Amino acid sequence: MNNEFLKVREHHEYLPGAMTKVPTWQDFIDELDYSMCNGLDMKGNNDGGLVIENSDHIRQSKNLEDRIANCNPGYLLTHTQIYISLSRMSTTFGKHNDTTDVWFWQCIGKTSWTVWDPDPITYILRPGDIIYTPVGMFHEPKPLTPRVGMSIGIKPL
């Protein structure tokens, strides 16, 4: 993956197979355990959807965070969140937009990801795929299988 893909820009971009080494289910279970044992922020619902606000122990995410930060001087890393759907029926946040520029990294399973740029375009994200969504752009993720993905966000200083 070249560094141009990691720079903030006006339009979305999808890069299939961007990351060849992805974290495992065990990596995410260990992060979930760490977050629970240490009282860190998490959100969940009764249909198997979880959001973990911490990713400090996922080695591969640190590398991607550092690359994104280095490609965008004048920006601040705001979050790396882990999204877990234990079922394809797990709900997400639906169609929404974010207050940061976001790179979403599909790590396990498959997700349908629709962006409105300005017309709707749908991608099927598989392990290793990354999609960039600029601040304010509407998008809608839907799990197609049990899945895990990571969202890395930045904003101007």
Image (spheres, rainbow, N blue to C red):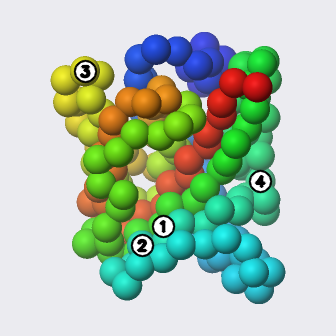
- Image depth: mark 4 or mark 1 in front: 1
Read off the residue under disc 3.
118
Q: State the residue at coordinates (53%, 37%).
A: 99
Read off the residue under disc 1.
84
> What amino acid is labelled 4 in the image?
Arg
Q: CA distance from mark 3 to mark 2?
A: 28 Å
Q: Which residue is at the front of the view, 66 or 77?
A: 77
Within 10 angstroms of label 4, few (less than 14), some, or many (20 or more) residues? few
Read off the residue under disc 2.
49
- Image depth: mark 1 or mark 3 in front: 3
Within 10 angstroms of label 3, few (less than 14), some, or many (20 or more) residues? few
Q: CA distance from mark 4 to mark 3?
A: 35 Å
Say whether residue 105 is left or right of residue 4: left
The first of marks 4 and 3 along the sequence is 4
Q: State the residue at coordinates (27%, 39%).
A: 114
The first of marks 3 and 2 along the sequence is 2
Q: CA distance from mark 2 to mark 1?
A: 6 Å
For numbered disc 1, what is the local secondary structure?
strand
